[in-house]
Image (cartoon, helix red, strand yellow):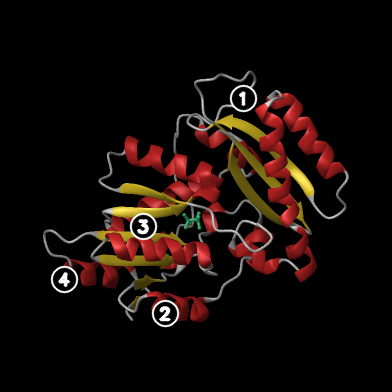
Amino acid sequence: MQIFYGKAALMDYLSTLKTTNSSIGFVPTMGALHEGHQSLMLQSTKENDITVVSIFVNPTQFNNPEDLEKYPRTLDADIIKISNINPNIIAFAPTVHDMYEGKTLSQPFDFDGLENKMEGKFRPGHFDGVGTIVKRLFEIVKPTRAYFGEKDFQQVQIIKKMVEKNHLQVTIVVCPIHREINNLAMSSRNERLTLHEREEAGIIYKILNGAKAKFSNNSAEKTTQWVKNQFKKNKIFTLEYFEIADEKTLTTCKRKSKNKKYRAFIAVFVNNIRLIDTISLN
Ligand code: PAF
């Protein structure tokens, strides 16, 4: 299996490998790979001639230094997982210096306001960091298709907006959320939970499903209040936000409209670890 630690070597290699018609599938990750990532890689290998997976814990998208410091880093295990999926997958695990050339700063982006809602509101600067690194990775890998998980629904909308605004020649492919046995959405951060917290975290999806049922014959306001009450009763998880929003614009739903598609978004804390999830309400 080929692993590259620097962008110049990867770009050289891809230029020798790529013929005029070959397609490149790209799966950007921050490592600590789980089944969700594995499904993105599998789909990419089915749909493309070449698949590149990046493993890079991007410092500029972390607004909380403790979260960055404690983010799981499991490169050796990740490489084994990738090569078990398909030894032809190319791994790219650059250093911060290689990606940022001495200036670990993000560039400001205008995502037409998508960046100020939910994750953007609670994690200032987060989407500038995501935009900076994803754009840089796209410039290096030059993918035909790039694969992202639906769990980070807002991130996907932001990346689609970046692609549209910068006229990038890449198709964004969105893949379904993978869940653990108790329906906790798979996330690299789950590795930081204790066994007990991980088992109890099934409550997040249970409440999301409850919210979906409530929203079918109640207003967004009533549904939101119901969710808040559920978390008030819970001793382990603290709700950061619950929001029902228009899937396209991510605008908060004030009054339901039959022509719109809605989605619920949630962020909760357990022991300083932040978990997010989402569910379609239509
Ligand atoms: O979703 C992630 O893991 C990260 O935000 C991404 C897209 C790899 C950018 O660092």
| Marks 1,4: beta carbons within 8 A | no
* Nearer-N-terminus badge (1/4): 4
* Nearer-N-terminus badge (2/4): 4
What is the number of the mark on residue 88?
Answer: none
The CA distance from mark 2 to mark 3 is 24 Å
The CA distance from mark 1 to mark 4 is 50 Å
Specify few, some or many for label 4: CA neighbours under 10 Å numbering under 14, 14-19, or 20 or more.
Answer: few
* Nearer-N-terminus badge (3/1): 3
Specify few, some or many for label 1: CA neighbours under 10 Å numbering under 14, 14-19, or 20 or more.
Answer: some
Ligand 1 near label 3 (Cβ, under 8 Å)?
A: yes
Specify few, some or many for label 3: CA neighbours under 10 Å numbering under 14, 14-19, or 20 or more.
Answer: some
Ligand 1 near label 4 (Cβ, under 8 Å)?
A: no
Which residue is pictured at 44% across the width and 70% down the height?
95
Specify few, some or many for label 2: CA neighbours under 10 Å numbering under 14, 14-19, or 20 or more.
Answer: few
Q: Give the residue number, with chain letter if any, for mark 2.
A: 84
The CA distance from mark 3 to mark 4 is 18 Å
Which residue is pictured at 44% across the width and 38% down the height?
109
Mark 2 residue element: helix
Q: The residue under label 4 is which amino acid type?
A: Thr
Q: The residue under label 2 is which amino acid type?
A: Asn
